[in-house]
Image (cartoon, rainbow, N blue to C red):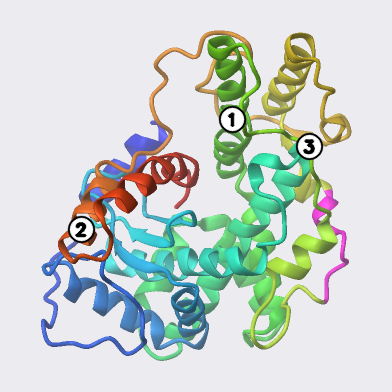
Amino acid sequence: MGIKDKLSRIFRSSDQAVVYDPNEKLTVDVDISLCTEEERPRMIRIINRLAKSEAGRETLEIAAKAGYKYGFLDAKTNCFGCCFGGMNCIGLGPMASDDKLVSTLCHESRHAGQGVRMADIPDRDKLDVASIIRYSRAKEADAQAYAVKACKELEMQGDKGPLATFAKFYPPIYKAYEEALAAENGVMSDKVVAGTFKGWYDQTGTKQNYEEGYIIDPMHDSLDAYAKNGKEAEVYTFAESVDSKTVVEKVGWTKNGNYLAGESPDFLDGERFLSIGERTKKDAADFFAIRKERMGIEPDKSVESMPTHPDAFKRRLPEMGKPRGDVGETMSMGGTIDKWNKILAAKEKYGKNTAQKKDKAALVLARNAAICR
């Protein structure tokens, strides 16, 4: 069963028989203008649940300060949530349960804060392959670790649903969390958050999904653009680098200190954290060879020394250099961007021209971001 089919089954089975108080007010100052009037009570309830945890409130407040708006994705989406950094919007998949969306909300809000703290790091489409792995994986691991921290704080207050649901969806991360918590005698310390962070890297299938979306798909895009226009694509240079120390300093930040401070500054260069799928390494090597032949651009040397692990599943994309064909989207946002633009236009938040300019960029972001939760 493919990832899209699995998520569709999960969404269809979600229990949405929840009654929301239309008079409930937000307990934290966030912008929910992407919601329709019908959606507002549900979004308020989810936000208020997360805000009862210290970690959850922190992520929400940082995202709000950065100017993020919250809303629900289109009902046809097969994604739990997305953070659209290019347009400062966070969306939640409406077909998932509220217990699932509490942790997803924390996860996506943590991404918003990462965008602020990591603003001086080159964009992902400029980084070399090893740097993409360090940067992108660490951001996902951090967002999940912080979501677990928030869910644990809620569990301690009697709201057990979010953490129990997280455990069902992400067994390797939850296992790492339990082991780290036991080692700390049940105290939710920085070491527990760091251990949870490391558990993200035990998800071989998830890592492969991101490799395909953040590395291999863009490589196909670059070759397709050259074949069509006879020149290199404007993005995906694979030229700049960011080291482990820098990523760790930026990604582990909290208002109470960096929870990864006790780790070796270069720990993200270890095999558990830096290895890529065997097919990913082959595809990358093939891409750089083809690019050198066609465009005269020297290969990204970072790939050569990267360790590998067996692939988790068969690549959906063809071999590098061959026609891509109709492989379909890894994830789909449905009509989310159109929906949000209509809401914002109706509220006179943006003029027609501004919405149109944002639309194209947001659709690209949607494809790249939607490999997510």
Residue type (three-letter) at the residue carrying disc 1: Pro
Residue 311 x %, y %: 64, 29
The CA distance from mark 2 to mark 1 is 32 Å
The disc placed on residue 345 is 2
Of badges 2 and 1, the one in the foreground is 2
Corner quadrant of residue 165 = bottom left
Asked if residue 75 lies left or right of residue 56, the reply is: left
Magenta run includes residue 267: yes
Asked if residue 277 lies left or right of residue 94, the reply is: right
Residue at x 56% of width, y 19% of height: 225
Corner quadrant of residue 305 = top right
The disc placed on residue 218 is 1
Between 162 and 297, the residue placed more toward the observer is: 297
Asked if residue 195 lies left or right of residue 144, the reply is: right
The CA distance from mark 3 to mark 2 is 39 Å
Residue 113 x %, y %: 56, 70
Question: Which element is circle 1 on?
Answer: helix
Question: Which element is circle 3 on?
Answer: loop
Residue at x 33% of width, y 60% of height: 92
Residue type (three-letter) at the residue carrying disc 2: Ala
Q: Write down the region rendered in magenta.
A: 262-270
